[in-house]
Amino acid sequence: MKFDRDIVLAELSRFVQPVALIDTPAVACPGVAVPAQWLRFIEQQMEPNLLLLAEWDVISPDLPKIAEFLEASLQRVSLLKEANGATSLLYQYTTGGQLNFSRGRPPLSHVPERLAPLWDRVPARLRDFHTRLHDGWTFLPANSMGPLPVADWAFLSDDRFDIDEETASAMSIDIARVAAVFHNGGGDYLCLNFADSLAPEATGLIWWHEDPANPEPVDFWGVLDAWVGIFLEEADWRGQTS
């Protein structure tokens, strides 16, 4: 399909208040803070976008299904400015001919205070992704199905998870040291478990909303790639639709 600006803006307006969609560096709005590498991404709209793929190399070796999506199905990247002043890198693709969007927010410049003591134990590739490429990468309508922006990370001890004291005391983990960093859109979270202070990096854990007392230890990268891969497996290949 043709990524007509008016069609894209109309579809975006269902979820956010877009005020600018920037497809070339020449039309970047004055006063809009945009990472320099993002301008290079939108300048190079070739298929595949080799520069963008090279930047994804910081994390893609652990995520083969996502890498395949980027190479075969990503159709366009643009800069999105919203009415609230937020900017993001917009990934445009289609599923069954219908427009879909994922977005990355500007690279993280400051680690939230509550996470600072644990930041060195976040997997190194994930840290680099958030600080070099963009702070999270999620399905735009739901802010899910990808690494959440760091500001949206939450500990299982937070009120949103509604784990009562009796349940928490019976669990095999310290919920105050488990951070949910990925939401699958169905109520379940992929987490980083920081409880083992001797481990150099936090380990993976799934918190199932239907079985909240029994989080499941998992391979963090394997689950992240599998969940996103299932979500994106119906995405059209470039050139599949017109």
Image (tube, rainbow, N blue to C red):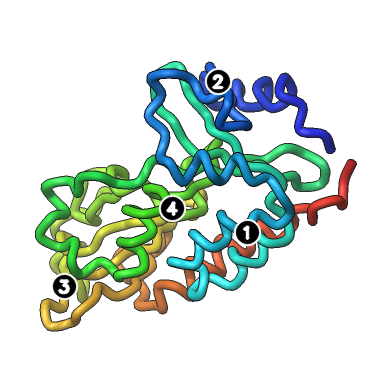
Is 137 on the left or on the right of 7, as rendered? left
Give the distance between the C-alpha atoms of the residues marked 3 and 2, in whole angstroms: 43 Å
Is 228 on the left or on the right of 95, as rendered? left
Q: Amino acid at mark 2?
A: Ala
- Which x, y percent locates residue 124? 30, 70
The circle drawn on residue 183 is 4
Q: Amino acid at mark 1?
A: Leu
Mark toward the start of the polypeptide (2 vs 1): 2
Write the residue at 68% across / 43% down.
76
* Crowd class of label 2 (few under 14; some 14 to 19; many from 20; radius 10 Å): some
- Which x, y percent locates residue 155? 22, 54
**Dot 2 corresponds to which residue?**
20
Q: Nearer the viewer, mark 1 or mark 4?
A: 1
Dot 1: element: helix
| Labelled pair 2, 4 in contact (Cβ < 8 Å) | no
Write the residue at 40% across / 77% down.
218
**Up/down of 220 relative to 151, above or below:** below
Give the distance between the C-alpha atoms of the residues marked 1 and 4, in whole angstroms: 29 Å
| Labelled pair 3, 1 in contact (Cβ < 8 Å) | no
Dot 3: element: loop
Depth check: 68 or 187 in front? 68
Q: Amino acid at mark 4?
A: His
- Which x, y percent locates residue 126? 35, 64
Q: Quadrant of residue 109?
A: top left
Mark toward the start of the polypeptide (2 vs 4): 2
Mark toward the start of the polypeptide (4 vs 3): 4
**Up/down of 30 relative to 192, above or below:** above
The circle drawn on residue 50 is 1
- Which x, y percent locates residue 138? 49, 47
Mark toward the start of the polypeptide (3 vs 2): 2
Mark toward the start of the polypeptide (1 vs 4): 1
